[in-house]
Amino acid sequence: MKIGVLAIQGDFDAHKKRLEELGAEVVLVRKPEQLDQIDGLVIPGGESGAFLKILGEQGIAKLKEFVRVKPTFGTCAGAIMLAKEVTNPGQFGLGALDIRVRRNAYGRQIDSSIRTGKLGESPLEMVFIRAPKIERMGPGVEVIATEGNDAVAVRQGKAMAATFHPELSEDDRLHRVFLDLVRDGNGVHG
Amino acid sequence: MSENNGHSTSLRLKTGLAEMLKGGVIMDVTDSRQAEIAERAGAVAVMALERVPAQIRAEGGVARMASPKKIREIMATVSIPVMAKCRIGHFAEAQILQELGVDYIDESEVLTPADEAHHVDKHAFKVPFVCGARNLGEALRRIAEGAAMIRTKGEAGTGDVVHAVKHIRQIVQEMKILTVLSEEELYAKAKEHGAPYELIRIVAKEGKLPVPNFSAGGIATPADASLVMQLGAEAVFVGSGIFMKNSTEFADPVEAEKRAKAIVRAATHYQDPKVLLEVSEDLVGAMKGLAISALDEAHMLQTRGW
């Protein structure tokens, strides 16, 4: 199972390390054609606006096609990338998840925090850094994790997203959920 | 719902933001118009300044924290993180910048130092700090004081990459040496580097700094960005090299934006000569610059800080 981590910029190394610990083969994806070689993709934290600018039209078109057919997991900036609608300020979204996301919704860096939310019913540490919030969810969106009253990790079809950074915590459960999704998506179980 | 506020929690959040900037370009800007250009070009953050280092160098005088009004304007213009510089040791400037809500403070040798013996106690702040370093000892002393990101100093405002290279090579080599030493040798190294033993031990074990390590000071072209990143820098700060034509004149904004975009792409594809060629081909030359070898020791900014 080959997992790509989008490595335009951002904390792609943290994801790579976590995925390798869980036994995945990891490729850092910097060029659109590399998307053809992978079974699933992680879009890391970073600056979503910078991702879009560096990807360019061709890269975005290729990525949009990828997220429709292959499992993708976005964290923070990655969640913004996967959303259908983005505010504060408005920007393009790949539309893999029927959600509206508000960028920098908690404030600036001094408002960043580590909180304990819930993954299903069990506690999960969540690192929020200049994090977005999910403001609206379409009917097909399933909530995986919550913090207070907010949905902070969601899934729809082959796409999943977290507004926080599971790659910066010790807890590897969300990455496991994603790897399961990739296995199922490729018809390989177990 | 609980929110933890311990010491290590705070450091994780501070280095966490630096993690998000890796592989990117942080650009010096002096007004909101330049900030817009930087954001449009794909910068991951901007450094809000009154004057860029090349101007500070040319004009002389005391260089201080930028005016809060100007920083606020820049913060209101862009959605990427905004950093600002305080003078070395000037914790009151740092308090003002934290109150203002900047995302990172650079305790910088580019400004005129405010304290000849002490750097800011950065653990006392909630906002993260980046500090410059020329060697491993200096980097670890700053980390001990609470810096959440290190940038090699290079020689700011010159457009000459030679000392950015010297400093990243120095730090990387000093770290490599630690990884092969025995325990008793590490104690001696702690003394030699003037750095806390605990941090020396962490570097010996991990082979890298416990915080992200970026490069700055003289990076002016896409090739420069690629060079320092191939040598081990995890992201780059580009100061005067984007918006200045020479030490006193601004570059044409269209040219500046092209250069900014080219350096941004070079940082992502730093290991790919094909892309580097492509982005370099479009440019009409970089800032004129100052050769560091022709500078007096007294005019060096990098020797500020200890």
Image (cartoon, grey):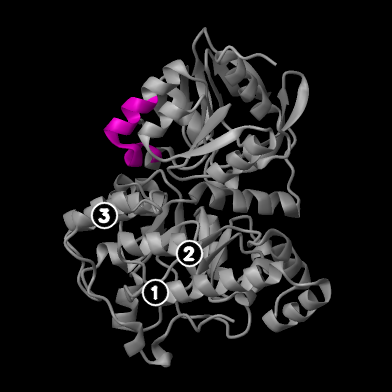
Say what amino acid the circle numbered 1 marks. Answer: Ala
Magenta segment: A51-63
Residue ID for mark 1? B156
As drawn, B210 above or below A122 = below
What whole-number distance in Å separates the C-alpha atoms at marks 2 and 3? 19 Å
Q: Secondary structure at mark 2?
A: loop
Compare marks 1 and 3 and give the one earlier in the sequence.
1
Q: Is residue B182 visible?
A: yes
- Residue A58 shown in magenta: yes
Compare marks 2 and 3 and give the one earlier in the sequence.
2
The disc label shown at residue B138, or none:
none
Residue ID for mark 2? B231
Hey, which quadrant is residue B4 in on the image? top right
Chain letter for the residue marked with disc 2 in the picture? B
Q: Tell me: B59 left or right of B270.
A: left
* Residue that appears at 31% across and 75% down: B54
Compare marks 1 and 2 and give the one earlier in the sequence.
1
As drawn, B255 above or below A99 = below
Residue ID for mark 3? B277
